[in-house]
Image (cartoon, rainbow, N blue to C red):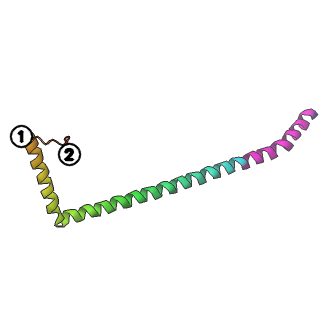
Amino acid sequence: MGELIGLAAVVLIFGIPLLAIWTSHQQKIAKMQVESTAENTAEKAAQYATQIQRLEDRMQVLERIVTDKGYDVATQIEALRDARSHDEAAGTALDFDRKERA
């Protein structure tokens, strides 16, 4: 019985400090993981903010195009495209592959 008490004392003497060291190490690892996750999250948030800003800028441009007189120009361009596709469907062939020689 005395040997068992001696063994328990040795285990406690060495085990408690080892447990404290291991717990401290685990806390440091957890802290590093949280910091890494926070940095990644902040970086992604910045990327999303930049992308949202670009999309908002594009939307403003599109709104200006629709509300300005330039919309009439866009409508005319689309009408010309429709006319061209109608001509192509009717059999008017345009030879884009042939290059002019100077």
Check the image and report above or below for 82 versus 57.
Answer: above
Judge from the rendering whether residue 4 lies leftward or rightward of residue 39; answer left or right.
Answer: right
Q: Residue extending furthest bottom?
A: 68
Span of residues in magenta: 3-24
Specify the label residue 47 is tagged with: none
Q: Where is residue 20 in the image (x, y as percent from the top left)?
A: 77, 48
- N-terminal of the pair, mark 2 or mark 1, is 1
- Badge 1 marks a residue whose secondary structure is helix
- On the rendered structure, is 66 left or right of 50? left
- Give the tally of numbered discs: 2
Q: Residue 90 carries which label?
A: 1
Q: Nearer the viewer, residue 59 or 22?
A: 59
Answer whether residue 10 is magenta in the image. yes
Counting from the top left corner in percent of width and height, residue 50 is at: 42, 59
In this figure, which residue is indicated by the disc labeled 2?
101
Give me the residue at 33% from left, 62% from top: 57
Residue type, mark 2 in image: Arg
User: To which quarter of the image does residue 92 belong?
Assistant: top left
Residue located 9% across and 49% down the image: 83
Residue at 17%, 62% in the rendered image: 71
Q: Main secondary structure of the magenta part?
A: helix
The one nearer the camera, 48 or 8, is 48
Q: Are marks 2 and 1 in contact (CB under 8 Å)?
A: no
Q: Name the residue at the left extreme.
A: 90
Q: Three-letter amino acid code at disc 1?
A: Ala
